[in-house]
Amino acid sequence: MVDRYHELNKKAFSDFGISFDIYSRTSNKIHYETASQFFRKLYDQGEFIEKTSSQYYDEEAACFLADRYIVGTCPHCGNENAYGDQCEKCGTSLSPTDLINPKSTISGSAPVMRDTLHWYLPLDKYEPWIRKWILEDHTEWKTNVYGQCKSWLDQGLQPRAVSRDLDWGVPVPVEGAEGKVLYVWFDAPIGYISATRELTPDWEKFWKDPETRMIHFIGKDNIVFHCIIFPAMLKAEGSYILPDNVPANEFLNLENDKISTSRNWAVWLHEYLEDFPGKQDSLRYALCASAPETKDNDFTWKDFQARNNNELVAILGNFVNRTLVLTANYYKGVVPAPGEMTDYDRETLTAIMTCRENTESNLEAFRFRQALAEAMNLARLGNKYLADTEPWKVVKTDPERVKTIMYISLQITANLAILLEPFLPFSMDRLRGWLGISSLHWDAAGRSDLLSPGHTVSSGELLFSKIEDDQIEKQIQKLLDTKKANQSAAAPVMPQKEDVTFDEFSRMDIRTATIIEAEKVAKTAKLIKLKVDTGIDVRTIVSGIAEHFTPEELPGKTISVIVNLAPRTIKGIESKGMVLLAEDESGKLVFVTPEKKIKNGSPVK
RNA sequence: GGCGAGAUAGCUCAGAUGGUUAGAGCGCAUGAUUCAUAAUCAUGAGGUCGAGAGUUCAAUUCUCUCUCUCGCUACCA
């Protein structure tokens, strides 16, 4: 599966002109080495807190057992089927070691006590310098990033375990750590280091040279890892530099819904290319122009169409076409020599450099939307220049003047090819080919002599083509179909659990009951405190249903309750029993209610 | 529930240490124009700057409360 998606993603990036110096993966050997070494160095330096806890281990299943997977005899009441965390008969909370004759619920065998050691990164210890580093030294970070970090720091950092008992992953490189692996958020960011090592023996200059400016481009869900945990690891290691900035984007939605590959609510790049062959730049443009830089944003096909038709075709493609057609008509494609410049000509040429500067400064500040808009302004400037100078009229009276006009228009065109190259690499590559300036790149931008008089340019093709309504409707329909399919699809029903005996089942005492009162538990989002008439008594039950029901609609409802579930204190309220509800895959809750009115306290069996 | 980010023209976004008519692009309307993929250029119409209260001579900009969206987090027996 990893292989399949690695190749799929790699190809998609490449097909869309997104090139990486290296596109690697953390399943490579070099990553195992890098992550191991990194851990080992921290270990040798004594950076970790080691905490051993004794946990039951199932030798037959060869795994550690969580408390709930252990049953045994309760030391208080003699119940033979108490769980590792609690006896359901007497309600005492237990630890697994309290149980007499413990058994694993996985294999049924008797578990043995085994010490399990884990390593913790003491983030609390690093908190002072992290606080200063972000809150004082990096006030320039984006507000969403800065605010999220501040929130974490103000809540106080806690040591975090960096290992797990699992049978896959990078093994913990310490004697006697068999069966232990590095936890994913520890090894994943190290993957960036591994990939750099894979790329070049000179990798340290990227990661350790104080002159290097390290930038992490991420989405907002990873802010904590890239701003706090990974930097803490790097600093603890000692030889690494820290990121200079972590410009996190927000989320992009698709037609008003969260993008989800599993729900097929997505635009698959390979399918896009089938439907819009050769139109990589149109999608790149639409995505960059409405990137979620400051808040979540929505990608819609209508917007995509408008961006393509009204901006790429009408403003950029059209200007380039006008210039090349005029040059072909008047000079057979040969760049004319400019004559005397007017003030307006000089202003226009100066504005080219201004466009470059504006584009650059916005790129430097991670404002890609604005950078793209600034580069596009040059095409607007070009259209205005032609409209103002009207070479198609002037050519009849003053052909010499037209040479200057076309010379300037051509310089604008050449500059467009360079300024827009990072955003629209496919189209600009074609344009540079037509102009014969394939060797010119960013450093040349802003100049007004990119095309020399006498140089020949070709034309005859269009840079962009319009996207018609029916193409867009087809894409929207595709998504509507997906939505319909998702709704009607036999939602994957949860697989059946392990068999239980009749005895086990009959220990559960389920009764019909009626809700008498309901009130929301303060300071919680989900909890409602219910007063329930079980027939046996009137008791309090706390239930996590506040997101589905209001307290007002509940009194009078007939429900089913497990009445002998061990009491549990939730938010300071003792909850005696559990209300039964059915839950579908979307999380919707429905009470399990007797079909007909029946006396409270009637057993369900 | 706590915390963070956001809420500004039909759409996507700027902006203001509080101060005369709140900006841009796209869309829309009108006019001009024809070299150009009916593209372009000009002009214009659109906003009680999420709601309410407060501070102030003055708030959309500061303070408080509230609503909604997104994220992190506690709770869900």
Image (cartoon, coloured by chain):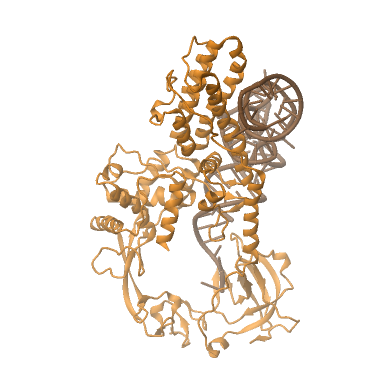
Residue A126 appears in the rendering: no
Q: Quadrant of residue B28?
A: top right
Q: Position of residue A578 (x, y in %)?
A: 60, 76
- The chain that appears orange in the image is A
Frontmost residue, A188 versus A228: A188
Left or right relative to A569: residue B59: right
The residue that appears at 52% across and 81% down in the rendered structure is: A88
Q: Does A349 appear above or below A311?
A: above
Give the tally of numbered discs.
Answer: 0
Q: Position of residue A453 (x, y in %)?
A: 44, 18
Left or right relative to B8: residue A353: left
Q: Quadrant of residue A533?
A: bottom right
Q: Quadrant of the C terminus of chain A?
A: bottom right
The residue that appears at 37% across and 61% down in the rendered structure is: A183
Chain B, colour shown? brown
Frontmost residue, A22 versus A600: A22
The residue that appears at 63% across and 47% down in the rendered structure is: A471
Frontmost residue, A65 versus A447: A447
Q: Position of residue A274 (x, y in %)?
A: 54, 51
Q: Residue furthest front?
A: A332
